[in-house]
Amino acid sequence: MQKAILDFSLPELTAILTLWGYPAYRARQVWEWLYRHKVTDFEAMRNLPAALRERLRAEFRLAALETVAELRSTDGETLKRLWKLPDGQLIEGVLMAYDDNRRTACISTQAGCAMGCVFCATGQMGFVRHLTVGEIVAQALEFARLLEAQGERLSNVVLMGMGEPLHNYEATLETITRLNDPHGLNIGQRHITLSTVGLVPQIRRFAEEGLQVGLAISLHAATNAERDALIPVNQRWPLGELMEAVRYYIQRTGRRVTFEWALIAGENDSESQAHKLGQLLQGLKCHVNLIPLNPTSGYGGRPSDAERVAAFQRVLRTYRVGSTVRVRRGVDIQAGCGQLKAQVSGVRTPPKPSSSQPGSE
Ligand code: SAH
Ligand code: SF4
């Protein structure tokens, strides 16, 4: 099979083109066609010699993803795409529009996930494989293309789709570099957020990278016994070690960390649990994102009602811990948090690529 050109870094492409006898600036031109102009075809790379375009087409494939289905939420503000990878694996990404003009892509880093969090649809699938850098970046590229065709720009990326980004560490790091590249997608590091279940050694390593990327930690419980039951990884890296690593991240980066808490009725939404969370986070440079549980087929839990959510927030305020309730987006199209389970059933096929893929010149 041809190699995927999106899997190559600029230095790697430069080395290849040099080997073919082209000067380095040709690789930079290819790069800009890929990531700035976001073309979908080597033919569109108009300022390259025809022979080079030909060679690129012979050696590489440009498309990394095949759109299998597309769903739009009833409010029209959330779009989910289901993609097929060359080996047949299915992954999903979500694009969300906000009133303040933010356009946020939520993208996947793995097919399935090895972490097994009980309430998460991806966890319920089990681990299939890591995605390559090209497969991760291609998701953002697709959404950026779609937005640019309607005069808008992809402003934010969250690595919160299927999979655990820090389990696929190298590809995730290279993805961040690629998204951030001023000659390409040019998304500011502060507009990129990575969410992790809490892989302690990787959080410490990530703290050392000298990045200004947002970090979100999936907490969901404030005692080890309770967290063990929801998030199996807690047995390996319990709360004490996790909080030490988070403190280290804040100290190294100066960044405020977000803690995610899926509110499950009768499970982790009581006032006493809010007190425990308040005690755990008091004084820390952080913010809590409360997400009423999104239903999944493999877990019987229900979302907390508005009253419980408000009471939970009131308790947190007494510890001066700020919190927001995440607006539930795209629940009607199974695009909410943790619902990204690849399934073709019940989705309609998208319009022909000619109308949905402008931006290809
Ligand atoms: N693997 C990473 C990122 C992907 S999950 C992580 O776990 O952080 C993104 C967020 O959705 C996480 O905070 C996760 O705990 C949360 N989540 C998973 N399933 C959910 C569900 N059914 N309802 C609400 N949030 C859920
Ligand atoms: Fe994996 Fe995150 Fe789902 Fe846990 S919540 S199973 S880490 S994707």
Image (cartoon, grey):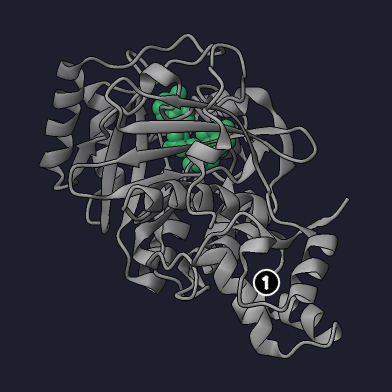
Vertical placement of residue 13 versus 100, above or below:
below
Residue for point 56% across, 31% down: 352
Q: Position of residue 211 (x, y in %)?
A: 45, 71
Q: Identify the secondary structure beneath mark 1.
A: loop
Vertical placement of residue 68 versus 241, above or below:
above
Judge whether residue 269 can be spotted in this image: yes
Residue for point 40% across, 66% down: 189
The answer to which image quadrant residue 226 occupies is top left
Q: Residue furthest right?
A: 1
Q: Residue furthest top?
A: 300
Q: Nearer the viewer, residue 216 or 314?
A: 216
Q: Residue furthest bottom?
A: 23
Q: Position of residue 79 (x, y in %)?
A: 41, 32
Instruction: Give the labeled residue for mark 1.
Output: 9
Badge 1: how crowded within 10 Å, few (<14), some, or many (20+)? some
Q: Position of residue 340 (x, y in %)?
A: 53, 28
Q: Left of 118 or right of it: where is 77?
A: left
Vertical placement of residue 317 versus 151, above or below:
above
Q: Left of 268 or right of it: where is 323?
A: left
Residue type pointed to by label 1: Ser
Give the image quadrant in which the ligand numbered 2 is located. top right
Q: Left of 355 or right of it: where is 152?
A: left
Residue for point 32% across, 14% down: 265
Q: Left of 245 or right of it: where is 83?
A: right
Q: Position of residue 1 (x, y in %)?
A: 88, 50
Q: Nearer the viewer, residue 169 or 238?
A: 169
Judge whether residue 226 can be spotted in this image: no
